Image: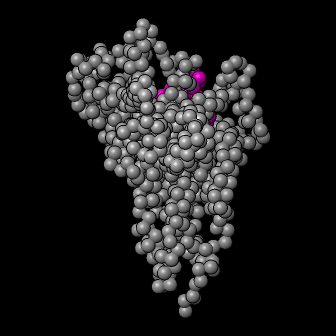
Amino acid sequence: MSVLAESLAGSRPRTPAARAVAALNRSVIHVALGLIGVIWLVPTIGLLVTSFRPRSDIQATGWWDIFALHLTLDNYRQVLEAQGMLQAFVNTVFIAVPSTVLPLAICALAAYAFSWVRFPFRDTLFLIVIAFLLVPVQVAFIPLLTMSRDLLPDLQLTRGYVAIWLAHTAFALPFGIFLLRNFFITLPPDMIEAARIDGASDFRVFSQIVVPVSVPAIAAYGIFQFLWVWNDLLMALVFVQDSSKFPMTRAIQNLLSQYGTEWHLLAAGAFLLMIVPLIVFFSLQRYFVQGLLAGSIK
Amino acid sequence: MRRARTPEGPNYGAAILFLLPAAILLVVFLLYPALYTILLSFNRGRNGVFSEWVGLDNYTRLFTDPDFINLSSFPPSGALWNNVLWIVFYTSIVIFLGLIIAVVAARVRYESILKAIVFIPMAIAATALAVIWKFVYAPDANIGLLNALLGTIGIAPISWLGDENLVNFALIAVGIWGSVGFATVILSAAVKSIPAEVIESARVEGATERQIFFRMILPMVSLPISVLAVTLVVNVIKLFDLIYVMTAGGPGKASRVIAFTMYQQAFQAGQYGYGSAVAVVMLVVLIPIMIYNVRRFRTGAVT
């Protein structure tokens, strides 16, 4: 228990009556927090249970009726094979990996320049990057689609993944540069000066000193960006036009508009979408929370 | 011969090499398109190209469109009004619950588990949140948990997402459920940064727990709360995925928000000039927050 928590709990009650009131207060707190835990867990658990129940059972009884519980993997089999969710899962990986690696590399390079290379108007340019943080992606949609249609018609960028890779990368830059630059400037100047005096080029300083010591910050940003892309629907709606290349978010949206109440398919599909973020969350919770906290400005 | 470099001298070569990839992408994918969209918003914009200059036509149409903003009825309606509802209820309730959980959970041993449970929705796609909650809200009391619970106290099933008076609040509740964990984590860190001696000395001087909360904890977390509020308002203005998957703006047009209207007008109705005007309104609404961020950063950099 933290020091603050102890001080918040107040001085020790002296009389039996005061002790009883304190105990009552504590049980009210436990009940309230327990209720919060239930409200935040039950909806997800309900969908998880449903994803393993046969279709006929789902229509007949609620998932909370544990006496009617028969479990099956049929829903997952059906959604993965017949509904193409396996392909959509692969597509999501295909979209998310380059859309994470590219911004990481480009942001780290730019953040190095903003931290350790001297050039005129550096601070002004960085303020422009900060202003770009909030530019809504919507202001770029129409021109980008028009440009790829009119200027590069033969490439058919939105038929493949190139359009969405580039769009995710570009829109990630202001935040990534901001975050990594704020970490890079906290590195000790002596470390960088010493390397330069030894004759190291900027690229060597970057790749052999700054990047290796910044792995925690880069990892936190990488996880944030990866989950951002993994969970995205809007960009995929605009920049992926070929239905065989749809990511899971679009596949689930399609399931929903085709069979609005086929809960056995929707539940299994939603869990396939959630599984990777949940694994990342539970295994890398510290980095994940750091990334999101730092990402609060996005 | 290699020129000796002083740390003070500008290094144009390195600056250009390190910044070039980012600069090209930002100009091609963000700056140029943003300027194009602003110009297109004054144009008919057929097919996404400059077809016919129409001046402020798109904007006058937009602000007289009752589906976008209708202030003549009570309560007002329209997509922009729904964003206002979101800002008022979502922002305040997320901060309120986040602060309560942060302060109260600090008093129990299972604090970290509880915070993790509340935080989990942050990891999940809005698309998945939408499926989870469409299921909770299902009108059939054999399927939807909420209507089943109401059934046990004798209330007939309610169509949460099918009633235009309820739909926005049902959606806002999902948004709150998804964001409280984020607020809790931020505010929990802020609450714990208050030195215990400060609070202890107040207590010695006779302050009650209530006074300590309102006069000491609250003022000291006011900066994190304002940063959080700004973040949540930005979330609301960019809100799209949840609405698109849960209701597609319906029933009718009752739950549309500004980002949904932009997508719908541009890509479903093919009105590119009009859609551009909606995108520009989104940008304009965010400009004060951009200025706030730049100012905050500059004062931070000076001190």
Q: Is residue A251 visible?
A: no
Range drawn in magenta: B245-262
Q: Which residue is pictured at 51% across the width and 52% down the height?
A: A294
x and y percent of residue B105 in the render?
43, 37
x and y percent of residue A192 in the render?
50, 76
Q: Nearer the viewer, residue A149 or B268?
A: B268
Q: Main secondary structure of the magenta part?
A: loop
Q: Is residue A8 visible?
A: yes
Q: Which residue is pictured at 54% across the width and 54% down the height?
A: A175
Residue B47 shown in magenta = no
Q: Is residue A247 left or right of residue B229?
A: left
x and y percent of residue B148 in the render?
38, 15
Q: Is residue B152 left or right of residue B39?
A: left
Residue B257 shown in magenta = yes
Q: Is residue B69 left or right of residue A243?
A: right
Q: Is residue B157 positioned above or below A194 on the image?
A: above
Q: Residue furthest bottom?
A: B1
Q: Is residue B291 positioned above or below B3 on the image?
A: above
Q: Nearer the viewer, residue A102 or A63?
A: A63
Query: In the rendered view, how is the structure colored?
Result: one colour
Q: Is residue A209 left or right of residue B26?
A: left
